[in-house]
Image (cartoon, helix red, strand yellow):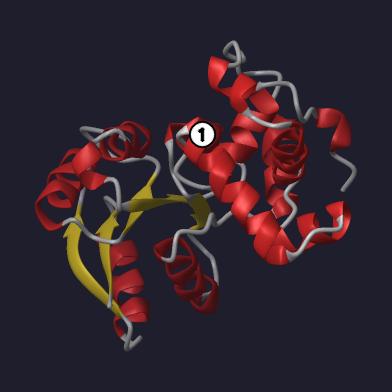
């Protein structure tokens, strides 16, 4: 059973998401929060599998709440999906950088919401390549890149190749086809990279690849 915490300051939004998710046999909405502070408190108390986190909330916004959750070692298994009114929101880049596993727009179709919860619950990132490209392209010039950490020096040449392709939004199967590897080998490379860099999922790898200069807005062709 996938246990979900809903965090949104609008009662109608929470009610709508609860109605959609509660109809699924493998998903349970365990609690609701009306602000970011309450979301962090409930996440610590209940340890849900997935938090659906509104980006703009009173008391503590979704970005800060996400940071508090993903940096709490006790909540290492808790995944956060950012909810936003717009698919390109100034806060989304920061949320992904903070450790969110992806984002959904609030008017997403019910089937996409359900799929997104399942994808993130199993440990994958919920961020479509096309939206990843638009996101980085839109906000690349606004965000000061930090200096690449020394962890990148520990990557092998092959792992760097794989990370570039992850940064370009390719799936494991697409990486395997590009580098003439088996999908299982590609998946192993991605897992090792995440371990070496201390990232929670592919969404953070995309951001790190950009910030390290391994991927730049020049590859945005669609």
Residue 170 image offset from top left, x and y in percent = 75, 53
Q: Circle 1 is placed at which residue position?
A: 196
Q: Position of residue 121 (x, y in %)?
A: 40, 64
Quarter of the view holding residue 198: top left
Q: Quadrant of residue 144?
A: top right
Q: Can residue 91 be seen?
A: no
Residue 182, x across and y down, in percent: 76, 64
Q: Quadrant of the N terminus?
A: bottom left
Q: Say whether residue 121 is left or right of residue 48.
A: right
Q: Left or right: where does residue 217 sit relative to residue 118?
A: right
- Compared to residue 14, the image places residue 130 above or below, namely above
Up-down relation of residue 151 to residue 11 (above or below): above
Q: Give the residue drawn at x 45%, y 59%.
A: 123
Q: Is residue 200 left or right of residue 129?
A: left
Q: Position of residue 69 (x, y in %)?
A: 27, 40
For the point 87% across and 54% down, which residue is it?
A: 178
Viewer-proximal residue, 44 or 74? 74
Residue closer to the observer: 100 or 37: 100
Any part of residue 211 in sight = yes
- Residue pictured at 45% horizontal, 75% vertical: 114
Few, some or many residues within 10 Å of mark 1 (<14, 14–19, 20+): some
Helix, strand or loop for disc 1? helix
Report the side of 112 relative to 98 (left or right): right
Q: Is 61 rendered above or below residue 192?
A: above
Badge count: 1
Quarter occupied by residue 37: top left
């Amino acid at each position: 059973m996938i246990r979900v915490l809903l965090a949104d300051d609008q009662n109608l939004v929470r009610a709508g998401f609860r109605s959609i998710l509660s109809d699924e046999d493998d998903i349970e909405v365990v609690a609701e929060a009306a602000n970011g502070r309450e979301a962090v408190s409930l996440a610590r108390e209940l340890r849900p599998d997935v938090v659906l986190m509104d980006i703009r909330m009173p008391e503590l916004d979704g970005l800060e709440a996400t940071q508090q959750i993903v940096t709490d070692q006790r909540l290492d298994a808790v995944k956060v999906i950012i909810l936003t009114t717009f698919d390109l929101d100034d806060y989304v880049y920061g949320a992904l950088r903070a450790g969110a596993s992806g984002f959904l727009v609030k008017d997403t179709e019910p089937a996409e919401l359900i799929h997104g919860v399942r994808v993130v619950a199993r440990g994958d990132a919920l961020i479509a390549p096309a939206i990843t490209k638009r996101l980085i392209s839109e906000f690349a010039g606004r965000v000061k890149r930090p200096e690449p950490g020394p962890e990148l020096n520990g990557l092998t040449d092959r792992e760097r190749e794989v990370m570039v392709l992850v940064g370009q939004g390719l799936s494991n199967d697409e990486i395997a086809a590009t580098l003439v590897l088996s999908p299982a080998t590609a998946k192993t490379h991605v897992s090792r990279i995440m371990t070496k860099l201390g990232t929670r999922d592919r969404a953070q790898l995309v951001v790190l690849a950009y910030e390290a200069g391994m991927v730049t807005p020049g590859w945005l062709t669609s």
